[in-house]
Amino acid sequence: MPHALPLVSASSIGSSISIEQDQGALVRRSVLPGGVRVFTEQIPGMRSATMGAWVGVGSRDETPEHAGSTHFLEHLLFKGTKRRTSLQIAEAFDRVGGESNAMTAKEFTCYFARVIDTDLPMAIDVILDMVTSPLLDKDEFEMERGVILEEIAMNDDDPGDVAHEKFTEAIFGGHPLGRPIGGTPEIIRTVTRESVWEHYQQHYVPEGLIVTAAGGVDHDVVCAQVTAALELGGWDMSDTRAPLARRDSTNEIVATQGGDISIVRDFEQAHVVIGSRGFKATEERRTTLAVMNTILGGGMSSRLFQEIREKRGLTYSVYSFGAPNADAGLFGMYAACTPGNTDEVTKLMVGELERMAEGVTDSEMERAIGQLAGSTVLRLEDSYSRMSRLGKAELVFGDLWSIGEVLDQVRAVTADQVMGLAAEIASRQRTTVRVGPIVNP
């Protein structure tokens, strides 16, 4: 039977581990000279291939003088290298029907591309050219400053985004996890090219780079292509540096509580987020939390959806969510409703959470487990999802469970475990954020 692939012990230069996973998929991991980690999953019969270049630095890692640099870099790496203009980067993927993009999170940044398997060498070359050789041109820098300010303004016009951002800020207080990933307008207007360049030089190094690839890939070929692309970009791949350690998750952050926060905006609806601190990403009960979240607000059959939307017609959108980080997390519920119904909807959400601590039915357990099992399998039917799973296993968890093992873990969750976790979350002091034309905030 396939079993978890441990990553903790294989961090020395030249080390390599491999294991067969579900349906004949072959997962392999190697540490190249220089400390670069390459992690692949070869999936029989899959013609697509997705590769990602991961750097374990996110918005929480920015120093005050480098604030906003992580997300700024994500934009700038697409704006040209020593070998390619921004147009040539875009054309490289359009020419083969592929796609490229990037994501900045609180704890990592990833640049990725999805192509057919025969175009993977091109994707590796282009993405790693961006990672190793960005120009950070002064004119492009100023141009992109305006683009990022527009992005922030767009998010600020989305009341749901505003509510979630304010909720995160309230939970984490002054901790860097409470900051917006993209920065604030004030930060972006004042950040300098020099500070972004310093941030790049500090964090974009071989020992901090992880390259993952999944789909129609060959591990040895990918390792050779990665090495060639990095050397072409001027990175020294002859050193014997060990990979950077994973982020420390042992010192859990004690989240603060912000009480009730009301932000008056001229929107048609009121947007409410209510919740508390949650759990870190490596929490042993994370599968139980997934089942609990599914029953509470994870779909159209969930308690929140059925009670507040279907039975009472008080909202169109309502759900629950968890947001884990290495050393802290949050758990919350969201709804958008007519301003006059805000108090009623808020009480109903809290009531459903508290009611879960008193009991869940066999039918709810069966439905939630089936929903999670099915969505897990379907979500991993494409090469991008498999590539992303590898990156997060390397950066966060330290091991990679087979899909079969994940399904076994889901099916092993009991109603008592769900009720106990719900009681624990319901007992925590809650923060409520309301955004919109609030009546008597």
Image (cartoon, helix red, strand yellow):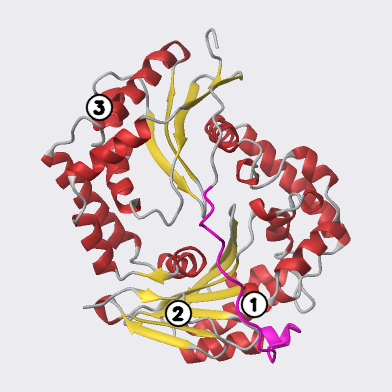
On screen, residue 25 versus residue 339, left or right, reads left
Residue located beneath label 1 in the image: 207
Q: Which of the marked residues, 3 or 1, is nearer the chain's N terminus?
A: 1
Identify the residue under disc 3: 355
Amino acid at the residue labelled 1:
Glu
Q: Which residues are magenta?
A: 230-252
Between 356 and 90, the one lying in front of the other is 356
The residue under label 2 is 40
Mark 3 crowdedness (10 Å alpha carbons): few <14, some 14-19, many ≥20: some
Indicate yes or no whether the magenta region holds residue 249.
yes
Which of the 4 image quadrants contains residue 23?
A: bottom left
Say which amino acid is labelled 3: Arg
What is the secondary structure assignment of the residue under circle 3? helix
Identify the residue at image location x=49%, y=68%: 391
Q: Is residue 334 magenta?
A: no
Q: Residue at x 42, y 64 (%)?
A: 385
What amino acid type is highlighted by mark number 2? Thr
In this view, the mark in front (3 or 2): 3
Nearer the N terminus, badge 3 or badge 2? 2
